[in-house]
Image (cartoon, grey):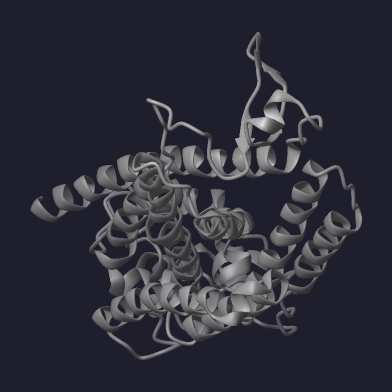
Amino acid sequence: MEALLLNYGVEWLNLLVRWLHLITGIAWIGASFYFVWLDNSIRPPKAGSDLEKAGVAGELWAVHGGGFYNPQKYLVAPKQLPEELHWFKWEAYSTWLSGFALLFIVYYFNASAMMVDKSIADITGTQAVLIGLGTLVAGWVVYDLLCKSPLGQRDGLLGIVMYALIVAAAYMLSKFLGGRAAYIHVGAMIGTIMVGNVLMQIIPGQRKLVDAMKVGKSPDPIYGKRAKQRSVHNNYFTLPVLFIMISNHYAMTYSHAYNWLVLAGIMAAGVLIRHFFNLKHKGQVAWGYPAAGVALLAVVAFSIAPKPAAKPAAGMAAVDMAKIMPVIQQRCAVCHSDRPTHNGFATAPAGVMLHTPELLRQNAARVYQQTVQLKAMPIGNLTNMTDDERALVAQWYEAGAK
């Protein structure tokens, strides 16, 4: 009973923190999308106008919610510091903090089940957690050093190098962690880079601009330029991160033998599509970018499509429910039942229950896909399902799942 209540409490904590993470993530990414759109959409004021004399670099008229808006951006700063100044920072901080909490609740709390796959690497849960945490720290340090190096002055080349390093990190993680955990840690690494940009560069740069104005000095525009660069980087990171946030629902991606390459293709497609919209905001419509992104997704989808299972040999005895149910009870129903007995599970994952013949028949196609075609379940193969048992499931399903 004590273990059940603990697992049930963790399930509720998972739900509430995930909800919070989603809310704050929407706020952060929404603000990022809006300000990059605004930056690309503003138009310079007329020559000799009062706006130009006031140091306004551009303005935009918009209508929304029944009202008219007229946002303006200054070349560096207005002549006087306004009494009220809104800072966009807590959206980023709250998203990262809730995301890290979720990482702990879902993965680190039960690392031996959620992160370790003995068929990939014979490591302990503690070692898996240390690898995950090390990736987050190393990702930020390497990225920040690159931005501060001469390479940081060449945005296009920096982007290519960073993409290659992220793919390399995905490859490395895929050799130590289960596919699902590897994906989520690539996303967590990118998210850490994004919040590091806000915490270590964007907000400090903005503070220096404000502090200079408070003492009557002209702000150094270099801080604004650095903050803008990091903000644009965050904008391009968003679509890959959003995919990774939902990737745990799609085992066809993270369970593939070349899951790191699958992720590389999907991330590249996201960046291409994001670039199209950023250009469009500037008035440049380049359909080649989204076309390339969609084509890349099509190539990935075609490449990872499951292959038909081999037909059972002629004369092979049929597998009926009496033969298949003991395998399901031992390998699957310890988690997928109305009362899971495996440590760390209070309810059946995804609501799929397999503890009775009727439920097994109802979910036969899903069981076949996850255990035979994708080999994604049991997660991390924590119940040690054998290849012979997977073949038995295939034989049962292809004979009609009777």
**Quadrant location of residue 247?**
bottom right
Question: Residue drawn 47% across and 81% down?
Answer: 173
Q: Residue furthest left?
A: 2
Nearer to the camera, 184 or 68: 68
Quick check: 190 above or below 258? above
Residue 395 in view here: no
Question: Where is residue 22 shown, x and y percent of the image?
Answer: 44, 42
Quick check: 81 above or below 270? above
Quick check: 242 above or below 383? above
Residue 294 in view here: yes
- Rendered-image quadrant of the C terminus: bottom right
Quick check: 287 above or below 61? below
Q: Residue furthest top?
A: 66
Residue 42 relative to residue 168: left or right = right
**Quadrant location of residue 32?**
top right
Question: Residue drawn 42% across and 40% down?
Answer: 24
Give the total number of marks visible in the rendering.
0
Question: Where is residue 118 shown, x and y percent of the image?
Answer: 39, 86
Nearer to the camera, 274 or 208: 208
Nearer to the camera, 29 or 294: 29
